[in-house]
Image (cartoon, rainbow, N blue to C red):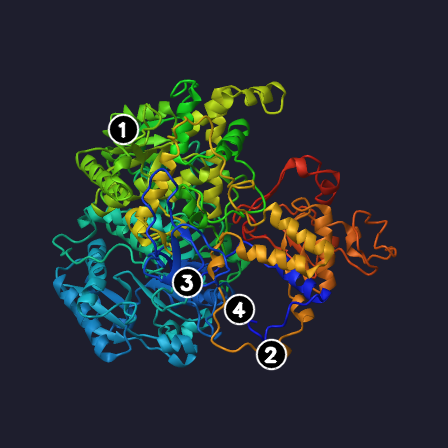
Amino acid sequence: RAVPSGDPTMPAASTSPKRLAWALAVLIALPAVVAFVPTGSFFGRTQQAPAASGLRSRARLAAPLRPATSRTSGAARLVCQDGRDAVKHADYQYLEERGACGVGFVASKKNVASHDVLHKSIVALGCMEHRGACGGDSDSGDGAGVMTMVPWELFSDIVKGDDIKNSGVGMVFLPSDEAKAKRARDTIEELAEEEEFEVLGWRKVPTDDKVLGPMARDAVPEIEQVVLKSKKGLTGDELEKGLYTIKRCFLSSLAEHGLDWVQDNVYICSLSSRTIIYKGMVRSEILAQFYKDLTNEEYKTRFAIYHRRFSTNTVPRWPIAQPFRIIGHNGEINTLLGNINWMQAREAVMDQTIAFPEGADLTHLDPLSDPRLSDSANLDLCAELLIRSGKSVMEALMILVPEAYRNQPDLDDKKEITDFYNYYSGLQEAWDGPALLVFSDGKSVGAALDRNGLRPARFLETEDLVCMMSETGVVPNLKESEIIHKGRLGPGQMIAMDLDTGVFEENYDVKGKVAKQHPYGKWLDEEQTTITKEPMSAKRLWGDDEIHLVRNQVSMGWSSEDMEMQIADMASTGKETTFCMGDDAPLAVLSDKPHVLYNYFKQRFAQVTNPAIDPLRENLVMSLAMTLGKKGNIVDPPTAEKAKQVSIESPVLNEKELEIIRGSGRKVETLSTFWPVADGPEGLEKAVKKLQEQAEKAVAGGAEILILSDFTEKAALEGEAAIPSLLAVGAVHHHLLSKKLRLSASIVAETGQAWSTHHIACLIGFGASAVHPYAAYEGVRSWHASPKTVMQMKNNKIPAISVEAALDNYRESVDGGLFKIMSKIGISLLSSYHSAQIFEAIGLGKEVMDLGFPGTVSRVGGLNLQDLANECISLHSSAFPETPLKALQNYGFVKYYSGREYHHNAPPLTKLLHKALKSKDIDEYNLFQESLKTAPLSVLRDLLEFKSDREPIPIEKVQPIEDIMKRFCTGGMSLGALSREAHETLAIGMNRIGGKSNSGEGGEDFSRFVPFEDVDAEGNSKSFPHLRGLKNGDVATSKIKQVASGRFGVSAEYLMSASQIEIKLAQGAKPGEGGQLPGPKIDNYIATLRLSKPGVTLISPPPPPPL
């Protein structure tokens, strides 16, 4: 019940054991780390922070909605207000239109059009219903459609004879309002006239609205077809270019007529002399009932692509049903924001005239991307541009969705194909994510699978047909005896059939023809600079005096935990530090300790239909390779000049590799990121804008590689602080985008502010192509030379390795961490992760986001630029105390220390809870509650209070506590992550109250499946001597049994004992990362439960959907 503070109707605190048990159960069962914030709130400063003077000066959050006795903070207060400072939505940020679908095609090898081909595809489409989804009315589909050749017989009353060669047909969705529909028709007719096309006529498409579901019927557009004839006599590819011009100018011209394609439901589904698309917001079995043409025997075609859509987390719409103009897509594009950013950069500078007829008016072209279209539709726009520029549809998709060609044994004797991929990897980042693409440009039809192969794709060939489908058995009237060949598409594979000749080819036959068109290998050998990993150097940057390193690291935001935990582990083992139990420290914006800017950003991860990748077992398809330098125009024909780039194996550079880049023959410009502390907090914005101007000038002057550096020979400068490297990179990246210069240069960050994998991932995600973490390398050298490390190596506590090996280990751990981070969002290539901005900010205001991170969401607002500057100055000032620092400060971000960073699972708070449990004293429990109320703010939820607009309901109308508790569940924590005592006690307690405990993924002892029968009067059991307070009839089994990809401890008995089975799909304490139990925790008992051996680390990776 939500009641006002001090409400006299609120029952007084009771000493009833039942109420105490209820309160404790709520405390234990409810999640402690997830915060929810109402849409539209933000944190805005209400008091100016004092000027920086070496003391920490930053915004702290308070809880203005709490009563006066609630948590408060002593610095400047931030309050929840209207969302003026928040960035609640950014184009493409959440890939808002995406899906997992059923697709396929049927094509005739005989170059003969027939209605049977269409009929077979319609039946196959009907079999895909279970792969799609319906709206809330259970009748309106997420989308279904077919693409075929133009059935000219249906237009015989408009065009016939030789005129067909010069004509095309448009399938158009028009507004249901006739006045608006007329304006839309006028728009098309005006564009046709401008491009010298004659409008031969309009045809109203025969439909039956009665078969539509309520939601689809409410949104159904007027559907008409327009026939256009070229006055210039264009045919073939030139005719397609002319029709493409009309499509590419339509949306802009529509806006000039006062119409919006989304709001007014206007869309050109197709406009071509070769293909036509019938689609809609319908279920697959309804499509042919709605479109009467599809059952007309005169509708004849040589091929048909079909698609049934499953729209993930989105509301379906008529225009974004599939197929699109070139492709039908089953999957999701995880790198969409980065792809769009780069496409906008290309669009701003590339000459697109090759894709249009000579003399075409290109002054009103629509953008090549639209945030209101789906990821599939944006990919389709890009593919069509490449096709109209003269590339085949197969070549276009090889460029946009390349296979995993590195370390691929099947390509050892096909160098021309790897050369093709290497050439274009420097020009076009992959559109990465799970994808089965079915495609046609009217000349060929085929299918391609993404590099991971996580979508099913089967194909078969008869004497007359080629069929491809998401599932076998869906194409009717095919006898097994008629099938001469069948197979499936593997990861990265492609099939294609020439519609004129009927020649069907598989994978490398298709790709070999494309790759042999130009001497890509020769161009790469002559023009590209390849930098392999160079040996590490043991030479210290600032000599053996550690004061210089400490001063640099303190000014850059390091703490002793970074050196003692992260650097030490990475250098000694070659792997990241393993953390557990989540992060119970306050969010950076709520902390009263200084934080680096990276801590305000959270990585997003794959979910729903989009699986994470296993970076261990699927590493073959992943790559960290990057290219530096100017990127050429992918629309123009390929040339040797476009191969002039620098290729690197890893984005984590050492000193030698950076030196080679500087001497690679490309113009390299190094820009300092320092700014005068004397300029005060206002100086940060000025410094960033000055850096942007310097970058613009350098690139305009021919620089191909920009190095943004905070390195100084003096380690740190007392009068100058470093711009946060993440802000510097993001601001320069977006400034160059806005100035149409981004494709002309790459950004390299030379910084002491990056040491963890998250830091380096942020830099790459916001625009850096490579990072030289010089302070991290120097930290490794310092760690290796320290007496503590020397003694540990001498005593065999850690491996005895050279400093060069330790430096290699550090880089290897960062590389491995980047693989893990990319895998969480289902991305295989770092070049696709590059600039994809797959983050959400928590605690940064619009001012900061607009300057350095446009396109990234920061839903609750937060720090402005002056706050951030105060943060920088505070860190910098702490590096120059009166007495020189000899060691890094421990802020207590990871481990709890008295007087340092607050942790909401801190020992003092836990002791209060334990005391209340043991004593069953309500006063002790009230003390625990009061400690929670007065504790420092740590999560966004701490800012919220119930605000009710109604009277509390009587307690008699509330469900009994016993019924409420039956819905309680614990989190999935395996035995090993929890002690045996804790794991069993949780299970017994939840079973007593009728709730459910979760086993986690570690199996369970069979003896826990049966009730206790040997409990004595004192509550002890001989079979479970480690437990106390037992009762006969207690059951220690977990009602929820978890299954993960490692299947540790999974047996028939384990599953049979479950009331509920939970399949762990790329989620958990480490979202998208799977589970991990370190070897030292695997004792004999746990090894027995997990069907493993003691001491062996058990990693259960994120599994793909087939689990």
Image position, residue 1055 (x, y; %): 71, 55
Q: Which mark is residue 954?
A: 2
Q: Which residue is mark 3?
A: 306
Q: What is the spatial separation of the Cα atoms under label 2 and label 3, in whole angstroms? A: 57 Å
Q: Tag 2: residue type? A: Pro
Q: Tag 4: residue type? A: Ser
Does the rendering let one see residue 1002? yes
CB under 8 Å between callouts 3 and 1?
no
Dot 2 or dot 3, earlier in sequence: 3
CB under 8 Å between callouts 2 and 3?
no
Give the SS element for disc 1.
helix
Q: Which residue is mark 1?
A: 527
Q: Tag 1: residue type? A: Glu
Q: Which residue is mark 4?
A: 5
Q: What is the spatial separation of the Cα atoms under label 1 and label 2, in whole angstroms? A: 80 Å
Residue at (46%, 55%) from the top-left corner? 72
Dot 4 or dot 2, earlier in sequence: 4
Foreground disc of the pair 4, 1: 4
Q: What is the spatial separation of the Cα atoms under label 3 and label 1, in whole angstroms? A: 44 Å
Foreground disc of the pair 4, 2: 4
Give the SS element for disc 3.
strand
* Quadrant where the image shows the N terminus: bottom right
Could you say which is closer to the camera, residue 88 or residue 44? Answer: 44
Question: To which quarter of the image does residue 367 belong?
Answer: bottom left
Image position, residue 931 (x, y; %): 58, 54
Q: Is residue 155 left or right of residue 1013?
A: left
Foreground disc of the pair 3, 1: 1
